[in-house]
Amino acid sequence: MRIRPRQSYLLIGLIAVLSIASGFAAYRHLHEPLVHSVSDETKSVSEAVKSLSSHVTQAVTIRLAQRDITSAFHKRRLNFVILGTQEDEGTTDSIILAHVDLDRRLATLISIPRDSWVLIPGHGFQKINAAYAFGGAKLAGQVVATVLGAHVDATIAVDPVGAKQIVDAMGGLNINVEHDMGYDDNYGNLHIHLRKGEQFLNGGQVLEYMRFRHDVESDCGRMRRQQQVLHEIARELGAPQNWTKIPRLVSLMRKDVKTTLNDAQMQALIELYRGVPADNVRTLTLPGRADFVGDVSVVLIDDWWARIIGRVVCSPNDPPQGVLLIANATGVPNVSQIAVSALRGGGWNVQSAIDEPTKARSTIVGDAVVAESLALAFTDFARRPGNQTVLELGADAQPKI
């Protein structure tokens, strides 16, 4: 079977959300008046005034953007489905549900393995990447919404034809390559040769890095590398010296992006998220395991955890802000990371996570409002009183991976 090139389309989706509406925001900021020094003696004072002016301008811009967001979306928490399409096959190579918290200027990106075995309405059980072939972005968005039990406000479908040019237009990216990567597929015209270490990669090399999946991590590693590159892109686009590149990125992308977002909505998102810190973008991947259905290689996602992640991340309502502790008593290392990522991604105030001896059953401890809200999300968990709110994950919450 021919192995087709695998590219990370998430990065293009990010640039689309940030810049497709003509680059007006960046242009306007670059033409905002600056405070200039009037003499060498007043240079330090002028610099201080300039810095203060910049902070005030940013604060005013954010407030204006938040007002525009209200009129553009009429809600404060949104869910977008970002699809990286393969037009030659009619399928999707990358599937992301992005939850956007407009008040906190946060974004949480949930990666869904493209080989996830799911029910596609009218077509039975198939790999989730086939939904786009059967019904375009609309059907793909519906399937994602069903898997996570979340409402989808808009879709962004990206044709990756210009991926390499877009990365090059950004001037490349600084990437820490975790290990040597070597792979050659002459039939599929795929050649990857990267050395371990932090280095500056051009567009072609970045795509090689994101396409590589021939190690023990397989597709999980590919999705992790997508997320790593996403953080680097967010950091680069957030730097004022790079705002001049946005119009060029826009021109490269216009033909490669299809979205249900209108111009007013995209403009409002641009204004609100311009310069947002990279730490405000969180990522997680749905838990699942590689398996076979007949002779077909698939990923069987953990339906229970998928629904939990959908409830706590994608809720239209803000969670209570009481302090929450997570205790991992599942007997499986790192399970608490899934819960921490999901809850923090949904705006919950998770203070810390600890490991405890294995317990058979999961329990929600506490009498505060946050414990009551947790019980609405984790409906199968037992309850017991306590002064501190604790989400105690027992063996019954072990992910099926």
Image: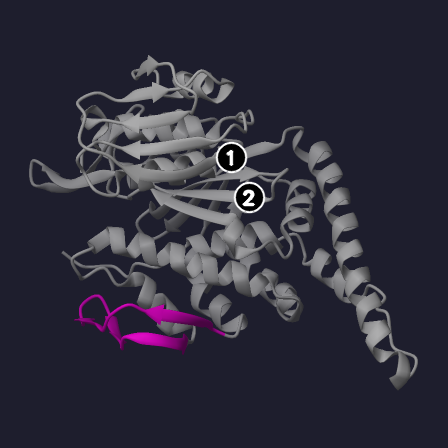
**Image position of 230 with respect to 354: above or below:** below
Residue highlighted by disc 1: 347
Which percent across, then down, holds residue 131? Answer: 33, 36
Residue 133: in sight, yes or no? no
Which is in the foreground here, disc 2 or disc 1? 1
CA gap between label 2 and label 1 equals 9 Å
Residue drawn at 70 percent across, 42 percent down = 264
Of 99 and 18, which appears nearest the observer? 99
**Image position of 178 with respect to 338: above or below:** below
Location of the C terminus (image quadrant) = top left
Residue drawn at 12 percent across, 40 percent down = 291
User: CB of mark 2 within 8 Å of CB of mark 1?
Assistant: yes
Secondary element at image label 2: strand
Q: Residue furthest right?
A: 38
Of 69 and 204, which appears nearest the observer? 69
Could you classify mark 2 by the number of other residues whose Cα lies within 10 Å: few (under 14), some (14-19), or many (20 or more)? many
Residue highlighted by disc 2: 106
Of 396 and 150, which appears nearest the observer? 396
Residue drawn at 63 percent across, 57 percent down = 275
Magenta segment, principal secondary structure?
strand
Range covered by the magenta-colored residues: 172-200
Q: Residue furthest front?
A: 387
Q: Amino acid at mark 1?
A: Gly
**Image position of 120 with respect to 105: above or below:** above
Q: Amino acid at mark 2?
A: Leu
